[in-house]
Image: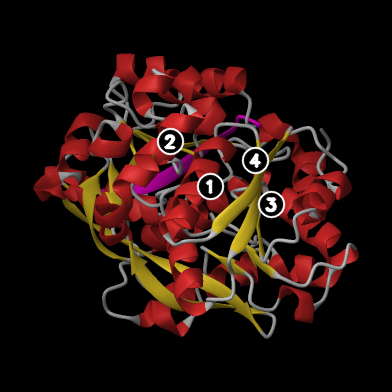
Amino acid sequence: MAMRHLNRRHFLGTSAAVGASALTGLGRPGKANADNETIKIGFLAPLTGDVAAWGLPGLYGCEIWANDHNTMGGVEIGGKMYNIEMVSYDNEYLPDKAKTGATKLIKEDGVKFIQMLGGDTWPAVQPIANREKMLVSTLLPSDLSPDTPYLVAPAEVHPIYNVTGVWWMAENMPDVKTTVICGQDDAIGRPSVATYQAAFEAHGITVNDTIFFDISTTDFAPVVTSMLASNPDCLCLDTAYAEFVNELCKQAYEQGYKGKIISCTADFYADIIANTSEEFMEGMIFQFPDFDDPALNDPRINFGDPNGFFKTYNEKHPGEWGAVSWEYASILDLWLSGAQKAGSTEPEAVLAGMKDGGIGAHAFGEANWWGEELFGIDNALVGNWPVVQIQNGKAVIVEFKNIPEWWDQHKDIMIKKFEDMGEMWYQRS
């Protein structure tokens, strides 16, 4: 499926200019100290194609992170100074390419850590990671199971954080009584749909219908028509791909929808507003803030200078800020902390350092290594997550909600919905 609209000229331009294979090695260190040794970190994610919006912006963030550390003299681990080199491989969100990329990064490039989006590409990499004892990160904790001892989710806790948006909606929009959920039928969409179903049930909002669509869908008019058939108070767009959210919102606008919208992401929301209107998008709830938000200057936030990072990112890559722009960089913070605790760059030692004490400095505050009840293993770093709303055309953090607090009250509902969807770890195994 060719990229459309939201993955648009920025990602299309990158692909056309250099080709998928030439994207490897985008993140070379800047003014690094020549006396330092070099640590190579792999970036194995979609850099072109339909899911590029959840890969390439993250690589840009990692480049900024690496260059910042290198220009400050490198990083100290075990009494030695190192430069950081990002080595990327475009898996195009295809399992076979992910397998090839993982092998190359480990065997040829000698990376010490691999960052992935995860999802449909992870099962092809899992046997390699286990055999090589390679530390790998995912943005999708639903990849986790007892069979993934070297896989961690230190930044994004998809899909469980989606409960926070529904939780806030129920408290602040009491007129929302009904909803319809839609999502693509894949390893990202299914567990997210189960999460939204659980959250709506927990907070007394009736789900009139759940609609899955194929990832090859290009015409979203029938999807939205079906969603509007029961006249719901809210449309839930699940964790639809960035371009899908754009098209779904556009169709809802064109079909005269006047109710609320909730979505996991609203990547490049300025484009969505341009395709609809500021009035139509007012009040949309999602989960990913802009990092110029004043709420991120709270001392509990563990992300250096969020506002400065946001400024630098937009200077280097105008119009490219999205959900993952900061996440992979945040994972590098946690990787570095683990390496420094361990005094080693070796994957198993870093993993032990990251999980030392059972807590970690998540971007949005101190969090617990958690997940056994839902994923079969405590390899997800779970704590607070922001609820974001579009207000006057701008993303605004309206509240931080605590995921473990929600889980303690409603976990039975969540587990039941995951089981119904066939997404519990023991079902996937």
Q: Nearer the viewer, mark 2 or mark 1?
A: 2
Quick one: SS at disc 1? loop
Cα distance in 3D space between marks 2 and 4:
30 Å
Looking at the image, which is closer to me, 429 or 195?
A: 195
Image: 99 above or below 405: above
Looking at the image, which is closer to me, 166 or 102?
A: 166
Cα distance in 3D space between marks 1 and 4:
13 Å
Quick one: SS at disc 2? helix
Residue 88 painted magenta: yes
Residue that lies at the very extreme toward the left in this rendered image: 357
Q: Quadrant of residue 73?
A: bottom left
The answer to whether residue 209 is left or right of residue 301 is right
Looking at the image, tell me whether mark 1 or mark 4 is earlier in sequence order: 1
Residue placed under numbered mark 2 in the picture: 418
Residue pictured at 27% horizontal, 79% vertical: 299
Q: Nearer the viewer, mark 3 or mark 2?
A: 2
The answer to whether residue 152 is left or right of residue 227 is left
Query: Which residue range is magenta in the image?
Result: 80-92
Residue placed under numbered mark 3 in the picture: 242
Identify the disc placed on residue 27: 1
Looking at the image, tell me whether mark 2 or mark 4 is earlier in sequence order: 4
Given the image, on which type of amino acid does mark 4 rest? Answer: Leu
Identify the disc placed on residue 200: none
Given the image, on which type of amino acid does mark 2 rest? Answer: Phe
Cα distance in 3D space between marks 3 and 1:
24 Å
Residue placed under numbered mark 4 in the picture: 47
Residue 320 painted magenta: no
Residue pictured at 21% horizontal, 30% vertical: 348
